[in-house]
Image (cartoon, rainbow, N blue to C red):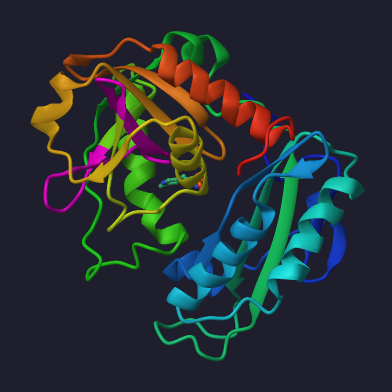
């Protein structure tokens, strides 16, 4: 078991200043803890550069707006806080977690009067999936829960509350010996994994679900650009689960997961192949500043 996340050395940026890691605390009557009035994003720093920092920072603000609160920092200030947090902790390759939430000034459903807090933590987090799993391709099962409809949840917000169905689905998957779970959406279409988007390869083309009820990941958008630049056809569409057997390759995308090949979704098997490996390598080179997008 790794060190608990509240008992580490270092500094956390909290409401505009650095506090020692172990002192970055909230009260038990924090609104966010009871009503999930919290949003977060995750970004990665490679060789001292945070990939797509502006997009991630804008997403934090946008996610909060969807939950009817305003992050009290501009996109530029959030970006600066991230850069400063990595520097203060002496990190050049790390994961960054900006988070914004409603404080304890009210404890009911209505929360207009609560103060909005924002923090940024950074730590070394090499790979979301174990390296030996990533090499062979990870195994997914079906998730217990489906992605909710846009009129039943704030599906375009990176809202903490949307992750409860992901945590339960991922626990059940891990208990059954899988690395993750494939979530369908409320209509029964293939949606995404519990913390990453999904792509399939068939006849040299990429197929990926239309992000109309789940996050349009920044990694997803980047991989689509990389593929198009290579002349690969990218088809964003609704995908039915009975099509899974027709795909040759499958991979996940996400800031934490980067590109992770999938070898199995329940009874369907895939063989990680050249297009997946090429995109993995190009994504890494792009993040490391060795490749630029047109
Ligand atoms: N879907 C979910 C549920 C996620 O948690 C993430 C990771 N943030 C993604 C997709 C991928 O988003 P991104 O590529 O922007 O990290």
Q: Measured along the vertical axis of the image, is residue 172 above or below residue 188?
A: above
Please identify the quarter of the rendering in which residue 6 is found: top right
Q: Position of residue 179 (x, y in %)?
A: 39, 22
Q: Position of residue 177 (x, y in %)?
A: 33, 16
Number of numbered discs present?
A: 0
Q: Residue 285, image x and y in percent?
A: 67, 27
Residue 259 in the image: above or below residue 249: below
Give the x, y percent position of residue 12.
Answer: 80, 54
| Magenta residue span | 183-205
Q: Which residue is located at x 63 percent, y 27 percent?
A: 284
**Residue 20 seen anywhere in this rendered image of the structure:** no
The quarter of the picture where the N terminus appears is top right
Tell me what residue is drawn at x 43 percent, y 75 percent.
Answer: 66
Viewer-proximal residue among 88 and 204? 204
Residue 184 highlighted magenta (yes or no): yes
Q: Residue at x 60, y 85 (%)?
A: 105
């Amino acid at each position: 078991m790794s060190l608990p996340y509240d008992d580490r050395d270092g500094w956390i940026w909290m409401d505009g200043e650095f506090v020692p890691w172990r002192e970055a605390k909230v009260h038990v009557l924090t609104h966010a803890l009871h009503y999930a009035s919290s949003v977060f994003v995750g970004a990665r720093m490679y060789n001292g550069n945070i990939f797509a920092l502006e997009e991630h920072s804008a997403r934090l603000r946008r996610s909060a707006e969807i939950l009817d609160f305003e992050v009290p920092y501009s996109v530029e200030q959030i970006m600066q806080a991230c850069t400063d947090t990595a520097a203060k902790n002496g990190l050049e390759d790390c994961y960054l977690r900006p988070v914004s939430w409603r404080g304890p000034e009210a404890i009911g459903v209505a929360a207009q009067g609560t103060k909005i807090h924002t923090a940024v933590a950074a730590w070394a987090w090499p790979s979301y999936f174990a390296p030996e799993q990533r090499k062979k391709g990870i195994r997914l099962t079906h998730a217990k829960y489906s992605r909710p409809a846009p009129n039943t949840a704030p599906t375009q917000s990176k809202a903490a509350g949307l992750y409860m169905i992901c945590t339960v689905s991922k626990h059940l998957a891990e208990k059954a010996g899988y690395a993750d779970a494939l979530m369908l959406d409320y209509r029964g279409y293939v949606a995404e994994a519990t913390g990453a988007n999904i792509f399939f390869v068939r006849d040299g083309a990429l197929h990926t679900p239309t992000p109309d009820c789940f996050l349009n990941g920044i990694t997803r958008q980047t991989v689509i650009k990389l593929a198009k630049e290579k002349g690969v056809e990218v088809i964003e569409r609704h995908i039915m689960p009975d099509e899974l057997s027709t795909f040759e390759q499958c991979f996940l995308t996400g800031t934490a997961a980067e590109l992770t090949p999938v070898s199995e979704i329940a009874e369907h098997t895939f063989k990680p192949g050249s297009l997946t490996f090429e995109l993995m390598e190009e994504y890494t080179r792009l993040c490391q500043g060795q490749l630029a997008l047109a």
